[in-house]
Image (cartoon, rainbow, N blue to C red):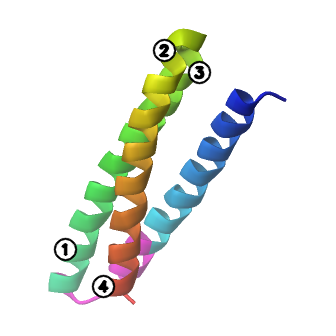
Amino acid sequence: MSNREAYEQKLQAKLDEWQAEIDKLRARAKGAEADTRIEREKEAERLEAKREEVRQKLEELREAGDDAWGDIKAGAERAWDSLSESLEKARSRFK
């Protein structure tokens, strides 16, 4: 397996993990008070949008030629970091 394939698999696994976290946030929102439920649902929507951005970057990585792969990987890592940070903030706010 090449480094590229390993990176793509790692990113896909992380996307799956993040989706599970977003789903947990939504599940907790259902049992919360109205104001909290709305806030958590909005946060889940923001996280979904960021997750979709990372998923799109993964697709770009899969389709990219070797010469463009490095540039697209850098963009994917920025999106990855942004989503990871946002999920961490949501976890700490909604414990």
Whether residue 64 is in magenta: the answer is: no
Q: CA distance from mark 4 to mark 1?
A: 14 Å
| Numbered circle sitting on residue 93 | 4
Mark 2, Cα crowd under 10 Å, few <14 / some 14-19 / many 20+, is: few
Q: CA distance from mark 4 to mark 2?
A: 38 Å
Amino acid at circle 4: Arg
Q: Earlier in the sequence, mark 4 or mark 2?
A: 2
Which is in the foreground here, disc 4 or disc 2?
2
SS for dot 1? helix
Query: Which residue is depicted at the point 53% across and 20% down?
Result: 69
Per the image, the residue denoted by label 2 is 68
> Is 31 left or right of 5, judged from the image as shown?
left
Do the residues bearing badges 4 and 1 touch, measured as CB atoms within 8 Å? no
> Is 30 left or right of 65, judged from the image as shown?
left
Residue 44 image offset from top left, x and y in percent: 32, 63
Q: Earlier in the sequence, mark 4 or mark 1?
A: 1
Query: Which residue is depicted at the point 48% across and 72% down?
Result: 24
Q: CA distance from mark 1 to mark 2?
A: 41 Å
Q: Which residues fall within the magenta stretch?
A: 25-34
Q: CA distance from mark 3 to mark 2?
A: 11 Å
Mark 4, Cα crowd under 10 Å, few <14 / some 14-19 / many 20+, is: few
Which is in the foreground here, disc 4 or disc 1?
4
Whether residue 29 is in magenta: the answer is: yes
Do the residues bearing badges 4 and 2 touch, measured as CB atoms within 8 Å? no
Per the image, the residue denoted by label 1 is 38
Amino acid at circle 2: Ala
